[in-house]
Amino acid sequence: MKTARKDFPEGFIFGAATSAYQIEGSAFGSAGSCHWDTFAATPGNVVRAEDGSRACDHHGRWREDLDLLRDGNFDAYRFSVSWARVLPEGRGTPNAEGIDFYDRLVDGMLERGLKPFLTLYHWELPSALALRGGWMNRDIAAWFTDYSRLVMSRLGDRVAATATINEPWCVAWLSHFLGIHAPGLRDIRAAAHAMHNVLRAHGEATAALRADGHGNLGIVLNFDHAEPASQTAEDRAAATTQDAIFNRWFIEAVTRGTYPEEALSGLGPHMPGGWEADMARISQPIDWLGINYYTRHFHAADPGAPWPATREITGPLAKTTMGWEIYPEGLRNFLTRMARDHVGDLPLYVTENGMSWDDRVENGAVEDAARIAYIDGHLSAVREAIGDGANVRGFFYWSLLDNFEWSLGYEKRFGLVHVDFDTLKRTPKASYQALARALAPRI
Ligand code: FCB
């Protein structure tokens, strides 16, 4: 690996990220049912009908996993709390075993010198709330706020940073318009309500947590570089529309209290009545912004289709096993764009970036030179963004472990550490070793 800790400003944080449903094992520890359990139990939703019931059994093996973070010379760990583990019915009586699990996990991080970066919602909506309409129900802002306050009353004294929601685009658009993630809806009205309620939940919870005395609160947004498939006016408009839905909707709501016209033109008629009155609450001050970045897409006009009337075209660059083009420049662009257009000097963290690859254990080792190059390329992009003046404070690789990649099951391996899903044996890959060397403490 060409990049090293010394190439970054003093105090820059290097970490790795995971999420609860993808690694813990939802069957363990008296967690309640969540909508990913039931979505996965429905034919056709997840490849090979895999689910997160066992996953990496991080619930039982968390000490070993935290040791891997410490031994990899990481400064921080981005993890999430499962709502259904803490509140099996989504509201009401907490599961003491669930909260105790996270309590020990956070202590375990501190004992190993790791800064805990907490995400309150990384997609495991309790089934009881999904049955009440989940993100389509206006009440979810209050349900999420109560849950967040409960978690923070136990963990808030020890976490370094807290994000309300991971990737609202996935929570709302991918799950209610494209139908790819739970609850698998393809309905523009459902999507419009979810696009608004996910932000209301963020705003309400942020205000309540701040009133409770908690600080360093943020949100994690995902960005996908949108390019026109050609220079025709129609294709340029298609890219502008997708950029508005994906890359502008959430950040403009949070920082300005507005939605972009290019997205409202389609979603407006389906929005909940009186949505404008919620925008002040949504645009609560935040203390940091998390940026998840993986790739870019080209967009073409699709004149026969209803709004947004665009279709995605794959570009020519080398791809990961997700079919995602490797395009580090996109990360530099988003970091500088966020600083310039939206958040100024607010601290930025790359909260996710990484690649899936067809990793195999051979003679006890995994040689993933492609991942080492991917990380190098994206760390260089971060350095360039810092050179441009963006206040980037940290970088988290996605993911520490191979894990349950949602609708794509266990076959897409993003980890720095290989997991054998039969034996659950962890094998650090060459990329893990390379990063450990690159992140060795400055002497
Ligand atoms: C992000 C998700 C994360 C993982 C990566 C590959 O969208 O936040 O859980 O699935 O993509």
Image (spheres, helix red, strand yellow):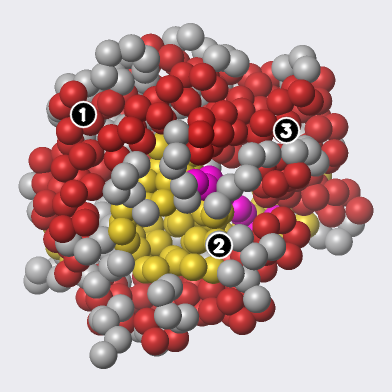
Is 238 positioned to the left or the right of 377 in the image? right
Please name the amino acid that badge 2 sits on: Pro
- The numbered dot on residue 347 is 2
Is 114 positioned to the left or the right of 350 in the image? left
Q: Which residue carries the number 3 mark? A: 280
**Magenta segment range?**
217-226
Q: Is 169 one of the magenta-colored residues?
A: no
Residue nearest the observer in this picture, 149 or 360: 149
Residue nearest the observer in this picture, 360 or 442: 442
Q: Is 220 one of the magenta-colored residues?
A: yes
Above-or-below relation of 9 to 160: below
Q: What secondary structure is marked by label 2? A: loop
* Furthest-top residue in this view: 132
Query: Quadrant of the rendered structure where residue 146 is?
Result: top left
Above-or-below relation of 133 to 265: above
Q: Residue at x 60, y 53 (%)?
A: 223
Q: Which residue carries the number 1 mark? A: 98
Q: Earlier in the sequence, mark 2 or mark 1?
A: 1
Q: Position of residue 53 (x, y in %)?
A: 22, 30
Circles 2 and 3: CB distance less than 8 Å?
no
Q: Earlier in the sequence, mark 3 or mark 1?
A: 1
| Placement of the C terminus among the 4 image quadrants | bottom left
CA distance separating discs 2 and 3: 22 Å
Q: What secondary structure is marked by label 3? A: helix
Q: Would you say the magenta stretch is mainly helix, strand or loop?
A: strand
